Amino acid sequence: TIQVCRIQIKGMTCTTCSNAVESSLRGVHGVKKAQVALATEEAEIHYDPKLVSYNELLEAVEDTGFEAILIT
Ligand code: 9UX
């Protein structure tokens, strides 16, 4: 089953930033879809929880140099 989650991302100031985060998320094994919106500072990610955890998605965002905050 594919799960959809949202992550708040702090520190992005241009579309190159948001594109970098988006590419990074799309490269994670188990991620089916990822969209990062600069205006709302949010990522929407469709992923297979059997292949990747929510925590690993947060880490993938932080590895790009931005702050990732869980949205509940
Ligand atoms: Mo845009 Mo982001 O010029 O680190 S790429 S600010």
Image: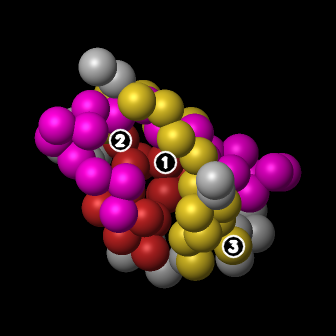
Q: Which residue is mark 1?
A: 22
Residue 29 in which image quadrant: top left
Q: Which mark is residue 7?
A: none
How far from the left and from the top, in percent, is residue 36? 61, 45
Q: Is residue 48 magenta?
A: yes
Which amino acid type is marked by label 1? Answer: Glu
Q: Is residue 48 above or below residue 7?
A: above
Which amino acid type is marked by label 3? Answer: Lys
Q: Is residue 55 above or below residue 27?
A: below
Between residues 14 and 65, which one lies in front from this camera angle?
65
Which amino acid type is marked by label 2? Answer: Arg
Name the residue rendered at 76%, 69% in the picture. 13
Q: Is residue 24 visible?
A: no
Q: Are marks 1 and 3 in contact (CB under 8 Å)?
A: no
SS at mark 3 in the image: strand
For the record, the magenta segment spans 36-55
Q: Is residue 34 left or right of residue 24?
A: right
Q: Which residue is mark 2?
A: 26
Q: Residue furthest right?
A: 39
How far from the left and from the top, in percent, is residue 1? 29, 19
How far from the left and from the top, in percent, is residue 47? 34, 34
Name the residue rendered at 81%, 51% in the picture. 40
- Number of numbered discs visible in the structure rendering: 3
Distance of label 3 from label 2 (alpha carbons): 19 Å
Q: Which mark is residue 10?
A: 3
Name the residue rendered at 17%, 37% in the picture. 50
Badge 3 or badge 2: first in the primary sequence: 3
How far from the left and from the top, in percent, is residue 5? 52, 41
Q: Are marks 1 and 2 in contact (CB under 8 Å)?
A: yes
SS at mark 1 in the image: helix
- Mark 3 surroundings: few (<14), some (14-19) or many (≥20) residues within 10 A: some
